[in-house]
């Protein structure tokens, strides 16, 4: 009898895969004809470009894919990246995969309005799930299964695979109503965003990041219950340990009808560095949006995108010890930022990773201090020229930019002519360094200090309390080539 059931479920699964495209109507899910609404407030062009941060637009609703209420078509989730807000799950799909029985009572009595997700585990830790309901009155439950390999979906339907985490806690309607009444009370100005604006003495603007919505149900390390049954009330169960290379399925079911959607976010709790990553235009005195990509290297899947966002405006990023990372940020009118580092290079106290976005406009300059020459010579001291490689990479990524290398010397004005020649020779040495490392010589011009500059520097050094400037050379943008 069991072999007949196995054959039957196998045929059903095959028919499901073959019949997805032509037989869309067979799905029990009814698609709503409503269109997604987005706010247009504050979206007019030509508005002020002051440093004030615009209010974030309401997120666009994601329509759940066809057949995603069946295990075979589970939606893949990315670690630490929210998915949603979604449309409402509607129906149980083509196949009723989860049904409780006397032997297995701690399952859905049946799937009502479900959606399946799956997530690949990139590193060892504890599984964390955060689910934000759009409508607080919806009664969402969820189960977590570990993928057992071939025929996993069939084994779930036959109750041969049991969930590793169960959250069937019922909704406390009375408690939600009381919380809603408290929330609806008018707030004093002191408690509003307007009343919480803080003045800063510095010119650096305050970054106004959108608040993170609070999850209503999920799984986290602070919870005490390992399982919530139908008779229990609550929203959160305790995290379970997971390991790199494993895959887990999450089936989320709304018991009620006419419900709304949700947002789901899966993460892995691990000892990690989570600094605030920001990009700042010092000249414009403002944070800027960038096209940002951060890749994690070292996992079983090779390179894993941690962030891929064309309009990244700042936020916390998780870097896991033992992994290498590549960060690449670009924006029109600015030099791109490229960094490779190991998470171990970051310090726990480094709560902010602030990258200066340097403009590519003519006249922008970069004063370099941490490069050293032999005393009275133009030869670079070995081992002290590595700082130049950051600028080599910067200009290599922007072949359209031309620049001037200006050399400096520390002079008491005893032999001004000799000092002028030495400053020019040092500029030429740095130019040769750039050429040696792949920068076209046609893009680089050189200059030394003028006679008046040397006299002023010498006078400043001889004054009481005066001293030499620490600048060894300066890179000045002269323009852009016309053949790009």
Image: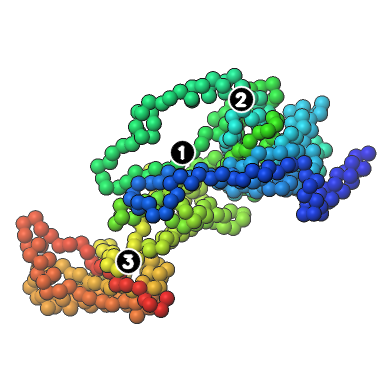
Q: Quadrant of residue 201?
A: top left
- Pick the quarter of the image with the N terminus: top right
Q: Which of 43 and 458 lies nearest the eye of the viewer?
A: 43
| Distance Cα–Cα, label 1 vs label 3 | 35 Å
Give the CA distance from mark 3 to mark 2: 57 Å
Find disc 3 in the rendering and name its residue. Answer: 361
**Residue 211 numbered mark, or none:** 1
Q: Secondary structure at mark 2?
A: loop
In the picture of the structure, the residue carrying the numbered disc 2 is 234
Left or right of 312 on screen, residue 370: left
- Percent x, y for residue 26? 80, 46
The answer to whether residue 162 shows anywhere in this view is: no
**Going by the image, does 363 lie left or right of 268?**
left
On residue 347, the disc is none
Dot 1 falls on a residue whose secondary structure is loop
Residue in the picture at 38% in, 69% down: 395
Q: Badge 1: how crowded within 10 Å, few (<14), some, or many (20+)?
A: few
User: Mark 3 falls on what kind of element?
Assistant: loop
Relative to 299, is 181 above or below?
above
Q: Residue at x 51, y 21 (%)?
A: 181
- Above or below residue 98? Residue 73 is below
User: Residue 449's spot in the image, x, y percent?
Assistant: 17, 73
């Amino acid at each position: 009898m069991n072999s007949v059931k196995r054959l039957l479920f196998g045929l059903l699964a095959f028919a499901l895969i073959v019949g997805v495209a032509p037989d869309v109507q067979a799905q029990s899910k009814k698609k709503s004809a409503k269109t997604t609404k987005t706010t247009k407030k504050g979206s007019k062009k030509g508005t002020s470009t002051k440093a004030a941060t615009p209010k974030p637009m309401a997120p666009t609703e994601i329509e759940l894919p066809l057949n995603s209420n069946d295990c075979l078509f589970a939606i893949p989730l990315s670690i630490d990246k929210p998915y949603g807000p979604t449309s409402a799950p509607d129906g149980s799909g083509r196949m009723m995969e989860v049904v409780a029985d006397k032997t297995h009572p701690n399952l859905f009595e049946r799937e009502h309005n479900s959606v399946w997700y799956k997530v690949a585990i990139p590193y060892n830790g504890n599984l964390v799930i955060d689910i934000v309901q759009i409508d607080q009155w919806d009664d969402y439950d969820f189960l977590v299964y570990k993928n057992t390999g071939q025929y996993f979906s069939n084994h779930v339907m036959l109750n041969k695979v049991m969930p590793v985490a169960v959250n069937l806690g019922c909704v406390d309607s009375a408690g939600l109503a009381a919380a809603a009444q408290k929330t609806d009370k008018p707030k004093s100005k002191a408690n509003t965003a307007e009343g919480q604006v803080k003045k800063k003495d510095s010119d650096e603007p305050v970054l106004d990041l959108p608040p993170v919505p609070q999850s209503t149900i999920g799984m986290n390390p602070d919870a005490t219950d390992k399982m919530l049954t139908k008779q229990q009330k609550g929203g959160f169960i305790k995290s379970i340990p997971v390991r790199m290379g494993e895959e887990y399925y999450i089936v989320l079911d709304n018991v009620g009808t006419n419900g709304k959607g949700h947002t789901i976010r899966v993460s892995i709790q691990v000892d990690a560095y989570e600094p605030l990553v920001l990009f700042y235009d010092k000249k414009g005195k403002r944070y800027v949006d960038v096209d940002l990509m951060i890749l994690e290297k070292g996992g079983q899947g090779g390179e894993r995108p941690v962030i891929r966002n064309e309009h990244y405006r700042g936020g916390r990023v998780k870097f896991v010890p033992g992994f290498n990372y590549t960060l690449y940020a670009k924006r029109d009118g600015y030099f791109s930022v490229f960094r490779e580092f190991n998470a171990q290079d970051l310090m726990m106290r480094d709560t902010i990773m602030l990258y200066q976005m340097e403009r590519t406009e003519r006249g922008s300059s970069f004063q370099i201090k941490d490069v050293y020459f032999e005393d009275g010579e133009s030869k670079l001291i070995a081992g002290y020229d590595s700082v130049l490689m950051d600028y080599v990479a910067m200009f290599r990524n922007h072949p359209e930019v031309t620049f001037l290398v200006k050399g400096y010397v520390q002079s008491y004005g005893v032999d001004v002519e000799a000092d002028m020649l030495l400053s020019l020779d040092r500029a030429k040495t740095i130019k040769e360094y750039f050429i040696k490392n792949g920068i076209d010589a046609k893009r680089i011009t050189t200059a030394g200090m003028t006679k008046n500059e040397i006299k002023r520097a010498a006078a400043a050094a001889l004054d009481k309390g005066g001293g030499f400037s620490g600048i060894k050379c300066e890179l000045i943008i002269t323009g852009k080539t016309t053949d790009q």
